[in-house]
């Protein structure tokens, strides 16, 4: 297996760093999947046991000026690595003013993602910083555990309000209860609520957009408008701390965040920014 990539544009370096920073706030370890045209960050916990799932995909051409890889074989030209996004982030943070950064799969005492960072120097000498991030190569027999989650058959899809506003609301609510109910309808309304024996608190949002989804090429795509108009609310009760962690993790300033609710089963968040997409699946918790 071989992998080598080089990022030169400083904006792309910052954007890639912010994506890794977002992932690092959600998980301690994840799967880094490398293919010929995309790079993925994947978390696949058992939904039935209350675990979350993450699927983040980046087109390599959007970030890398140079990109070369060879997978485990010709018929399986992919690489799966278990990695700590926090360790990656610590390395990338030194690249805030880099001329370029190279990321390579190397073999030291253990397999590593080696990051070479060319930093500005006051002299004619090159100032090169090298970080080795240990990784674990995932055997091919385990690859089916990290396939893309299916789009849930949701009851309502709604565009989220500003995440900063939601974050402030949820951070106050999490002091009242461990669980939060998120409800939405097809009339552009969403509400967040918590209940205790002593108090019931709800925050309501109105005039939100209900996007529609159309199937194209076997996958669902967002459309611009919705013909649905219903006041019926669909609800999912989730772990408030996991929801707060999701809101606090965002460093990519997504251009659009869509929330899909499967009544009493799951919330599916879909974040879009340029060519990058991140899906976050949060299952309900029973009372």
Image (cartoon, helix red, strand yellow):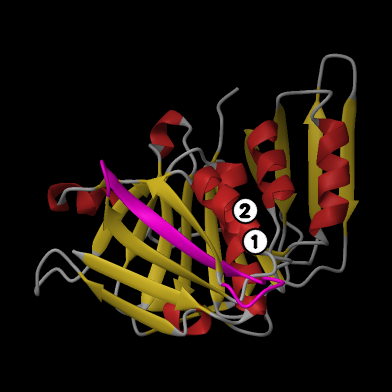
In the picture, the quarter occupied by the C terminus is: top right
Q: Is residue 246 above or below residue 61?
A: above
Q: Is residue 1 above or below residue 197?
A: below
Asked if the residue under mark 1 is in contact with the one under mark 2, i.e. CB atoms within 8 Å, the reply is yes
- Left or right of 287 in this view: 67: left
Q: Is residue 63 above or below residue 71?
A: below
Range of the magenta residues?
108-125
Q: Residue drawn 66% across and 46% down?
A: 246
Category of crowding for the residue at label 2, using alpha-carbon neighbours closer than 10 angstroms: few (below 14), some (14–19), many (at least 20): many
In the picture, the quarter occupied by the N terminus is: bottom left
In the rendered image, residue 245, in percent from the top left (x then y), is placed at 68, 40
Q: Give the SS element for disc 1.
A: helix
Q: Give the SS element for disc 2.
A: helix
The numbered mark at residue 21 is: 2
The numbered mark at residue 194 is: none
Q: Residue drawn 16% across and 48% down?
A: 139
Residue 104 in which image quadrant: bottom left
In the rendered image, residue 59, in percent from the top left (x then y), is placed at 45, 78
Residue 106 in which image quadrant: bottom left
- Let me know if residue 99 appears in the view: yes
Category of crowding for the residue at label 1, using alpha-carbon neighbours closer than 10 angstroms: few (below 14), some (14–19), many (at least 20): many
Hey, which residue is sitting farthest front in the picture?
Answer: 124
Q: Residue drawn 79% across and 55% down?
A: 190
The residue labelled by disc 1 is: 18
Question: Which sits in the foreground, 227 or 180?
Answer: 180
Q: Residue drawn 72% across and 65% down?
A: 230
- Let me know if residue 263 appears in the view: no
In the rendered image, residue 173, in percent from the top left (x then y), is placed at 84, 32
Q: Is residue 28 magenta?
A: no
Question: Which sits in the foreground, 64 or 225?
Answer: 64
Question: Which sits in the foreground, 39 or 233?
Answer: 39
């Amino acid at each position: 297996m071989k992998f080598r990539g080089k990022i030169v544009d400083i904006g792309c370096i910052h954007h890639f760093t912010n994506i890794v920073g977002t992932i690092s706030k959600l998980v301690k370890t994840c799967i880094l999947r490398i293919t010929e045209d995309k790079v993925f960050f994947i978390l696949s916990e058992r939904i039935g046991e209350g675990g979350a799932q993450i699927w983040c995909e980046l087109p390599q051409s959007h970030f890398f000026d140079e990109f070369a890889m060879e997978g485990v074989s010709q018929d399986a030209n992919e690489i799966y690595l278990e990695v700590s996004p926090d360790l990656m982030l610590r390395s990338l943070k030194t690249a805030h003013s880099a001329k370029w950064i190279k990321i390579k799969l190397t073999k030291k005492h253990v397999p590593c993602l080696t990051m070479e960072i060319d930093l500005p120097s006051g002299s004619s000498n090159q100032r090169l910083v090298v970080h080795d991030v240990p990784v674990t190569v995932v055997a091919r027999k385990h690859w089916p555990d990290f396939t893309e989650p299916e789009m849930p058959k949701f009851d309502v899809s709604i565009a989220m309000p500003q995440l900063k506003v939601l974050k402030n609301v949820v951070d106050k609510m999490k002091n009242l209860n461990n669980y939060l109910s998120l409800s939405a309808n097809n009339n552009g309304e969403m509400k967040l609520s918590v209940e205790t024996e002593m108090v019931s608190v709800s925050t309501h949002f109105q005039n939100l957009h209900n996007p529609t989804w159309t199937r194209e090429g076997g996958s669902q795509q967002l459309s611009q408008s919705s013909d649905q108009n219903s006041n019926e609310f669909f609800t999912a009760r989730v772990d408030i701390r996991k929801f707060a962690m999701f809101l606090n993790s965002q460093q990519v300033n997504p251009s659009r965040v869509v929330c899909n609710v499967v009544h009493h089963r799951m919330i599916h968040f879909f974040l879009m920014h340029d060519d990058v997409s991140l899906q976050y699946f949060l299952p309900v918790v029973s009372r």
